Image: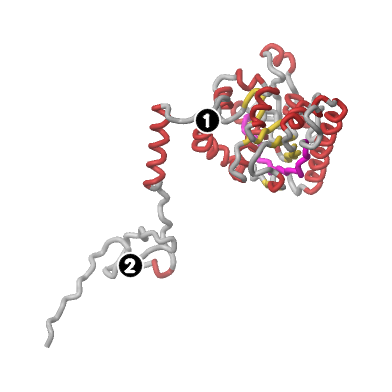
Amino acid sequence: MGEVVPIPVREPGSCTATTRRGARCRNRAVDVSGFCRVHGGGAVEAPTVAPSTEEIDELLAFLRRRVTGEYEVDEFGFDPELTETILAPLARLFHRRYFRVEWRGLEHIPRDGAALLVSNHAGTIPMDAVIMKFGLLDQIERHVRLLAADLVFRLPFVGELARKSGNTLACDEDALRLLERGELLGVFPEGYKGVGKLYKDRYKLQRFGRGGFIELGLRAGAPIVPVAIVGSEEIYPLISHARPLARMLKLPYVPVTPFFPWLGPLGMLPLPTKWTIEFRPPIATDGHGEEAWQDSLLVFELTDRVRDEIQGTLTRSLASRRSLFL
């Protein structure tokens, strides 16, 4: 007779099976066979999500570069690493989860080269600009360089953050330099008149000024992409500007909504409206000649064309919207 080899007996302990994702089952209520009593029924505990070694190494490398100053910042103060590593994930929670943005017409945005994204503006605070900027970083992996008013850069902390995330002062010289470098430029011609619209005037475009963005497009030969944002105009229903207080504080307005300042900090939470951001076919500007930007009639004509395109798109989107929040 051959030698009898004893069969090893496994002591009770952790389950040796794997989940459908390839992770070890974490159930410790097992018999001597090494399998949990409920594993065969499919009741497997989900694996714990933990940072991988690569993610930890990347975070440590990021922190080391911030401490040593070994990171790039362009002449406008734009810090792409900080924007992509820290700011973009925070903004992603808003445009993906909170406002649940539906993106339309992304094929109209150039994947390289200069272009102006010209949009309606509202919401009491310029959150629409931020959502468009970081949403497009996710959708097409391009940074949008927003043109902002000087008030933004005078605010403590906000001004520095605006610079580092790629925004720059709304002046022709800086804007033209960005376009000549092939950047996407975000422009909101309504300015304070748009972002501070009362709730009763929502989705009614204000004046687009003298058409400075058209002049920029003509000088740089960059296409102009009209943008219509629906959903942003209801996040803070503005019912008053509190003009006397605004003059004292030297602000364009002090917002008064049904919730702020009555509910204190809670009143600063935006309503979770459902957003739609639609990009229309680009309007070419490179076929009008080098001096076309000085042609006032052409500038006015193109300004009205862009404004009408945005207003028409807003009207159609509002007509097809099922609900403010769904």
Q: Position of residue 291 (x, y in %)?
A: 80, 27
Q: Quadrant of residue 175?
A: top right
Q: Earlier in the sequence, mark 2 or mark 1?
A: 2
Q: Could you say whether the residue bearing mark 1 is in a helix, strand or loop?
A: loop
**Residue furthest out toward the right:** 297
Q: Position of residue 235 (x, y in %)?
A: 69, 35
143 in magenta: no
Give the class, few, some or many, for how many residues have Cα within 10 Å of label 1's Cα (few <14, many ≥20): some
Q: Which of pointers 2 and 1 indicates the residue nearer the eye?
A: 1
**Predominant secondary structure in magenta?**
loop
Q: Is residue 279 magenta?
A: yes
Q: Is residue 200 visible?
A: no
The Cα atoms of the two marked residues, 2 and 1, are separated by 52 Å
Question: How many residues crowd around disc 2 within 10 Å: few (fewer than 14), some, or many (20 or more)?
Answer: many
Name the residue carrying label 1. Answer: 79
Q: Which stretch appears magenta?
A: 267-285
- The picture quadrant where one finds residue 37 is bottom left
Q: Residue at the spot x=41%, y=58% of the render?
A: 45
